[in-house]
Every structure is written in structure tokens, then in C-alpha cells.
Image (tube, helix red, strand yellow):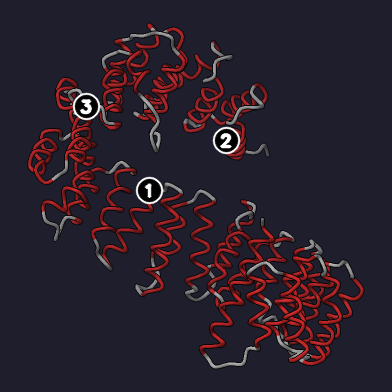
């Protein structure tokens, strides 16, 4: 599949070159044209004959030779290229495409000695050219011959008096050898000349070990405003889990076209990484420079994901400037209702829904009602939410109905209707885990706990989950784990530690036990009890070696140990 796609790509490029040649009134032989058409029809033997005819007329024709290289590869005759190459190079000794094809062919045939001889001949015939060293080093890198590639590049710098034109190969070599800072320096230089190498730089440097990242940051932020290098570093910071640092790299660039492009690309990458705080920051920066409704809506969505509904509402209103009611009903109303629902402003959401009802299609109206039903839930009026939905059977209404069943303690009804659609929120993940864990069909205490959580009353929700754990034995450890997390969120570490210690010691076989040990240790470290945190983390790592939390535990262990004063 891969060889076919590569062949198709190179063939397409040749056809494009043929069109350009016609447009520029350049000479393209009829044999070359015939060869391209035959190759396109996969008549490789006939195409080979046409290309050989073209080469007999013009021995140095690059187009004809590259065509012959492709069809010989399809026919399995790469060795037949060598005599043709010799004649072509004799006819056009300074044509780099022919020289590169020669060493490429010799490498594919495993003729190492002849490959080296061809390279040496190329350097002699073109003594001031970086091309021979670049092409040979690339092949060596592909074959994993790092030391030989290094010696070729060192020789190039000595012979040519500069490494200019070899930055890409140097950067890739240094990364492959684990010389991350030197690789970053070479990438900086390469990106100054060829900004289109950004993706290659990201792929090369993304594996940089954590201890070497400060050096890579320093070298990619070298003196000057190399926007491409900064874009690379921003992408790397996202990959490394430092979205705020990623945005800082780009935030203060001069306000020009290149910067706006960098911000836009960064916002897209950050959206993919779900780093919503910096998505919003980047989009708002773009908004100040080039305001559009689309940017405002994307920023509003990011603000909602970042749990800043008030900012989302302001951004939605900005997006509405210049839109009539019919357009707003389609473009901005859903986001406005979501923001009002998140704020618990159910009355305002209802008024907005009623005001725009005649401008929305029946389908949109159903979706809007489902959003406003959420607003009533957050305002604490479950009955009003039920009345608004009625007997609607849309996916959105069904999802809200599933939550309403859960809030009323109807676990069986929630189990039938709650589904993961799109992005799963932490609340949905918790609810699905609970419904899978327990066999109970009803639990008013559990429903009340989830309702308190939906209303944003974290303190009461934490207490309610503890109470629910008493009555729902088969989900007790799950509910206590949720309660502990909520207590920690309200800065009640003492109560959280009590619950985590209970889970870690009395319920060591429960699925929540590894998390309880980890969170208990984190709370101990926050309280300055580093030795106790180390003991707890070591217990987790030894007792639950296959837990997905072990890598996090190891990082926490390093931090806890580092905070313990050394004995003098």
C-alpha cells in the first residue's frame, strides 16, 4: 500500500511538472509524455521502453530518468538502473537529482562499497556543494548508522567551511544520538531557513527527556524572534503537558500576520489537547486583533470547558453583534443557553428560550429545551425541568431524562437512558461507574448526592455521598471515594484523609484503594508530612504494581523524598 501511494505521489508530481513545462514552453519530448501516460495506466514495460527512448535522445533528462526509476521499481528491476545512471551522469555530471538517485539505488541494492565510491565521486565533481553530504547523511540516518552519518557531516563542515544547508540532517542526527540541546540549536537554524520543517522538528524533539527540556527550551528561544521555532516549542510544551508555558512562548510575539497564524495554529492544537484555559487565551488574543463571530464562539466554548460560564456569556454576546434574531437562534443561542444553565440562571434562560422560539426550527427548539432543562436542574427545580421536557424522545432530552431519573433515585431508569455521547464529563463517568457497580434499582440518598453535585453545592454533595455509601453497600467504596475527592475540593483535607485512610486500610482489595493511597499521600505532602507521604507511596507501588496510578505515584515519591532534609 505504501509503495503504491508513494509511486502515485511521484507520478502526480511528474504530471504536474509536465503541465508546468507546457505552460512555460519548455521542451518535453513525446517519448517522455508517452511514458507518463503509460505509467499512469500501469503499463510499466511499455512505459520503461518510452523512458529509455527519451534517455537515448537526451541522456541527462531528469524527468525521463525518474520515470524509469519508478517503473523499474514496479517491475523489480532496480539493478537495471545502474548502467542507465552512469550514462545520464556522464551526460549531466552536475545534476544533483541523478547523483541522489544513484546513491539511493546502490543503497537499495546493498552495494555498500560502490555507494561510498559514488559519494566520493560526487564530492570531487562538485567540491563546494553540500548536496552529496546531505543526501548521503540522510541515507545513513535512515539505516541507523549514526556515527557514520556524524562523520560525514563533520567532514562537510570541514570541507565546506560551514554547516549551512545541512541543519536538518544535523538536527535529526543530534536527536537520534540523544544530544537534545545540540539538536534544538540545529533545529533553530534550520527553521530560520525553512519554516515548513516545523512538524519534523516537533516529531524529532518530542521525546526529549524531562531533565533535558530546559536546555531545549533555551535553545529554541535563542536570541531573535524565530516564530517557527517558537511554534515548535509551543507544540512541544503542549505534548509535555505544560499548556500555560506553551502559550507564554507565543503570547508576546509582535502583532503581525505570522504571529496571528501562530496563535491560530496554537489554538487548534490546544483544542485537540483540551487545554481549555490557554485555548481561550489564544482565541481572545486573536479576537482583539481580528474580531469575528466564529472566534468569539470558539472562545466562549473554551471558557465553558474551563468552567468560566460568565466569561462564556460575555463572549457569546460579542459574537451576536451584527446578527439578526434568526441567525442568532441558530449560531449563538445554544451557547448562550449553555452559559446561563452553567450559571444556574434558569429564569433568564427560560425567557431567552421563549424570546427566540419563533426563530428556531422545531428540531432546534427541542435541543434548546434540553439545555434549559439543565438550567432548571442547577437552580434546584427538577419538577420544572421534567415539565419542560415532557415526553420528548430526542437524544438530548433522553440524556437529561436519564439524569433526572438518577436525581430522583431511580437507578434503573438512569441505567436504561444514561449514555456516553461525545465528551464524557467527570460527573457522567462517576454516574456510569456507579450504575455499573450497584445492582440496586432505587436509592434516594444517591440521587440526592448527585443532585447536590449538579447544583454546584460541593460541600453538601460530599456529605450526601457519604450518607449514600451507608445505604448502598455494593457501591460503598466508590461513593466514599467521590466524597473524599469533594471534601478535598472544599479544602477539608482532614475529612478527606479520614475517608482515604479508611479505603486504603479497611478496603485494600477495592478498586478505589490505589487512588485512596495516592490521594492520601498527596494530602500528607501538602501538610508537610513528607516522610509519611513517602511511606504511603512506597506502599502503593509495592502493593499495586500493575495499577495505572504507579507512574503518578513515582513522580509524587520523587517530590516527597526531595522535600525531606538530608542528614548532615
Upstream in sequence: badge 1 or badge 2? 1
Return the residue nearer the eye: 359 or 171: 359
The residue depicted at 35 percent of the width and 13 percent of the height is 412
Name above or below for residue 156 compared with residue 336.
below
Q: Position of residue 27 (x, y in %)?
A: 62, 92
Residue 525 in the figure: left or right of residue 127:
left
Name above or below for residue 398 compared with residue 161.
above
Rounded to the nearest angstrom, the CA distance separating label 1 from label 2 is 23 Å
**Which residue has dot 1 on it?**
276
Residue that sits furthest to the right in the current view: 113
Rounded to the nearest angstrom, the CA distance separating label 2 from label 3 is 45 Å
| Callout 1 touching callout 2 (CB < 8 Å) | no
The residue depicted at 39 percent of the width and 8 percent of the height is 440
**Which residue has dot 2 on it?**
552
Residue 67 in the figure: left or right of residue 504:
right
Return the residue nearer the eye: 214 or 235: 235
| Callout 2 touching callout 3 (CB < 8 Å) | no
**Residue 494 visible in the displayed image:** no
Tell me the SS state at disc 3.
loop
Q: Position of residue 61 (x, y in %)?
A: 71, 87
Image quadrant where residue 561 sits: top right
The C terminus lies in which quarter of the figure? top right
Rounded to the nearest angstrom, the CA distance separating label 3 from label 1 is 33 Å
Estimate how packed mark 1 is, as few (under 14), some (14 to 19) or many (20 or more) residues with alpha carbons within 10 Å: many
Return the residue nearer the eye: 132 or 161: 132
Q: In the rendering, which numbered label is found on residue 392?
A: 3
Amino acid at each position: 500500500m505504501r509503495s503504491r501511494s508513494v509511486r502515485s505521489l511521484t507520478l502526480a508530481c511528474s504530471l504536474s511538472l509536465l503541465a508546468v513545462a507546457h505552460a512555460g514552453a519548455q521542451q518535453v519530448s513525446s517519448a517522455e509524455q508517452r511514458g507518463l501516460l503509460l505509467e499512469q495506466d500501469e503499463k510499466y514495460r511499455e512505459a520503461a521502453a518510452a523512458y529509455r527512448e527519451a534517455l537515448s535522445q537526451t541522456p541527462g533528462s531528469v524527468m525521463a530518468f525518474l520515470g524509469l526509476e519508478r517503473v523499474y521499481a514496479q517491475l523489480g528491476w532496480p539493478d537495471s538502473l545502474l548502467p542507465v545512471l552512469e550514462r545520464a551522469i556522464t551526460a549531466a555530471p552536475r545534476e544533483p537529482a541523478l547523483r541522489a538517485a544513484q546513491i539511493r539505488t546502490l543503497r537499495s541494492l546493498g552495494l555498500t562499497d560502490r555507494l561510498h565510491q559514488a559519494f566520493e565521486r560526487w564530492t570531487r565533481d562538485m567540491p563546494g556543494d553540500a548536496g552529496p553530504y546531505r543526501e548521503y547523511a540522510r541515507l545513513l540516518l535512515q539505516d541507523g548508522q549514526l556515527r557514520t552519518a556524524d562523520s560525514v557531516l563533520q567532514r562537510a563542515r570541514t570541507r565546506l567551511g560551514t554547516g549551512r544547508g545541512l541543519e536538518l540532517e544535523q538536527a535529526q542526527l543530534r536527536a537520534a544520538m540523544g544530544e537534545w540541546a545540540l539538536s534544538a540549536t540545529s533545529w533553530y537554524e534550520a527553521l530560520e531557513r525553512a519554516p515548513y520543517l516545523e512538524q519534523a522538528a516537533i516529531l524529532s524533539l518530542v521525546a526529549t527527556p524531562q531533565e533535558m527540556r530546559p536546555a531545549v527550551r533555551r535553545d529554541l528561544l535563542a536570541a531573535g524572534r524565530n516564530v517557527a521555532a517558537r511554534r515548535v516549542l509551543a507544540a512541544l510544551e503542549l505534548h509535555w503537558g505544560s499548556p500555560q508555558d506553551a502559550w507564554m512562548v507565543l503570547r508576546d510575539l509582535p502583532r503581525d500576520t505570522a504571529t496571528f497564524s501562530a496563535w491560530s495554529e496554537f489554538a487548534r492544537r490546544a483544542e485537540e489537547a483540551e487545554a481549555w484555559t490557554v485555548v481561550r487565551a489564544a482565541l481572545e488574543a486573536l479576537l482583539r486583533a481580528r474580531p469575528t463571530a466564529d472566534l468569539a464562539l470558539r472562545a466562549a466554548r473554551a471558557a465553558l470547558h474551563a468552567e468560566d460560564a460568565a466569561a462564556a456569556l460575555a463572549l457569546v454576546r460579542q459574537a451576536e453583534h451584527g446578527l439578526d434574531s434568526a441567525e442568532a437562534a441558530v449560531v449563538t443561542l445554544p451557547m448562550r443557553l449553555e452559559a446561563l444553565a452553567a450559571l444556574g440562571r434558569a429564569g433568564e434562560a427560560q425567557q431567552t428560550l421563549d424570546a427566540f422560539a419563533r426563530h428556531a426550527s422545531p428540531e432546534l427548539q427541542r435541543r434548546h429545551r434540553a439545555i434549559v432543562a439543565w438550567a432548571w436542574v442547577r437552580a434546584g427545580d427538577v419538577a420544572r425541568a421534567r415539565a419542560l421536557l415532557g415526553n420528548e424522545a430526542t437524544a438530548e432530552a433522553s440524556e437529561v431524562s436519564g439524569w433526572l431519573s438518577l436525581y430522583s433515585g431511580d437507578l434503573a431508569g438512569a441505567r436504561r437512558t444514561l449514555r456516553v455521547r461525545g465528551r464524557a464529563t467527570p460527573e457522567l463517568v462517576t454516574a456510569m461507574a456507579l450504575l455499573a457497580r450497584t445492582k440496586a434499582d432505587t436509592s434516594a440518598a444517591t440521587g440526592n448526592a448527585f443532585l447536590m453535585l449538579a447544583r454546584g453545592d460541593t460541600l453538601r454533595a460530599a456529605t450526601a455521598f457519604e450518607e449514600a455509601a451507608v445505604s448502598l453497600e455494593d457501591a460503598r467504596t466508590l461513593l466514599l471515594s467521590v466524597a473524599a475527592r469533594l471534601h478535598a475540593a472544599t479544602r477539608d483535607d482532614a475529612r478527606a484523609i479520614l475517608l482515604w485512610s479508611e479505603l486504603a486500610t479497611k478496603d485494600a482489595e477495592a478498586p478505589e484503594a490505589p487512588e485512596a493511597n495516592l490521594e492520601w499521600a498527596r494530602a500528607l505532602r501538602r501538610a508537610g508530612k513528607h516522610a509519611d507521604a513517602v511511606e504511603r507511596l512506597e506502599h502503593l507501588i509495592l502493593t499495586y504494581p500493575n495499577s495505572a496510578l504507579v507512574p503518578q505515584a513515582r513522580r509524587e515519591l520523587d517530590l516527597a523524598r526531595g522535600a525531606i532534609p538530608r542528614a548532615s
